[in-house]
Image (cartoon, rainbow, N blue to C red):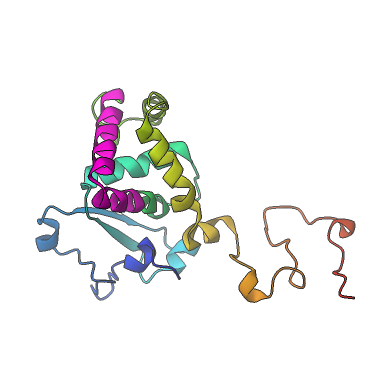
């Protein structure tokens, strides 16, 4: 599995941090932003991780700023089947960009401040309708474009999203689709035989 938020999950069964991520009180008091959440017990995504508890350490942004970006991602690309753990990958990628570029960091912080203002003071605590209105109010801003653009890869190009949507991943490593078929999405009806004929190997 690629290095994602799930691989940074803290195993609550033995308190062993993964990839050096520790959630002790001492570390939290250092001022580092940390996003924390849980996966639904028994869900496919929970089976991919050593624990239902996930955590993500932010390098440049605060927890509140990371939460705001996570929730903005939900407004822009809403999917009930995707847990917050997937949307946290958006915050992770934007945080990395902010850590590498002071101008990006300023754009994100200013944009989050604008979201809060549009939402009446606190974007995270606002109801769904107010969040949507706040995001729409910033549609012509570079901040909006930055977050929306990052959503495309952060939310969909990872194994957690693949599992949630039923995408088996790249077929190249498995010999392609010609012998394996391509109709593996369980939520679509089976195609007629003429739409999926046997491959011609002559």
The quadrant in which the N terminus is found is bottom left
Q: Is residue 95 above or below residue 179?
A: above
Seen from the viewer's position, the closer of residues 96 and 73 is: 96
Q: Position of residue 2 (x, y in %)?
A: 43, 68
Residue 64 seen from this side: yes
Residue 180 among magenta residues: no
Q: Position of residue 104 (x, y in %)?
A: 28, 42
The quadrant in which the C terminus is found is bottom right
Magenta span: helix, strand or loop, mainly?
Answer: helix
Q: Is residue 192 above or below residue 144?
A: below
Residue drawn at x 39%, y 40% as measured from the top left: 147
Q: Is residue 112 above or below residue 24?
A: above
Q: Position of residue 42 (x, y in %)?
A: 46, 64
Q: In the visual, does 45 lie left or right of 30?
A: right
Q: Which residues are magenta?
A: 91-118
Seen from the viewer's position, the closer of residues 46 and 156 is: 156
Q: In the visual, does 7 lie left or right of 81?
A: left
Q: Position of residue 54 (x, y in %)?
A: 32, 61
Residue drawn at x 28%, y 39% as measured from the top left: 108
Using the rendered view, name the quadrant where residue 57 is placed: bottom left
Q: Is residue 180 above or below residue 193?
A: below
Residue 114 among magenta residues: yes
Residue drawn at x 12%, y 52% as measured from the top left: 31
Using the rendered view, name the quadrant where residue 177 is placed: bottom right
Residue 82 seen from this side: no
């Amino acid at each position: 599995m690629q290095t994602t938020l799930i691989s940074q999950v803290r195993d609550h069964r033995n308190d062993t941090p993964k990839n050096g991520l520790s959630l002790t009180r001492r570390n939290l008091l250092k001022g580092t932003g940390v996003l924390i959440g849980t996966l639904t017990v028994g869900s496919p995504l929970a089976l991919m991780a050593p624990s239902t508890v996930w955590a993500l350490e932010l390098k440049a942004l605060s927890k509140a700023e990371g939460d705001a970006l996570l929730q903005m991602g939900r407004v822009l690309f809403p999917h009930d089947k995707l847990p917050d753990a997937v949307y946290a990958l958006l915050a992770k990628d934007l945080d990395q960009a902010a850590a590498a570029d002071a101008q990006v960091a300023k754009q994100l912080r200013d944009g989050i401040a604008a979201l809060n203002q549009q939402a009446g003071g606190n974007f995270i605590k606002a109801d769904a309708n107010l969040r949507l209105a706040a995001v729409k109010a910033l549609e012509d801003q570079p901040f909006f474009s930055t977050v929306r653009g990052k959503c495309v890869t952060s939310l969909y190009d990872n194994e957690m999203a693949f599992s949630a949507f039923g995408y088996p991943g790249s077929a190249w490593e498995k010999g392609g689709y010609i012998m394996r078929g391509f109709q593996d999405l369980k939520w679509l009806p089976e195609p007629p035989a003429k739409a999926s004929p046997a491959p011609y190997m002559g």
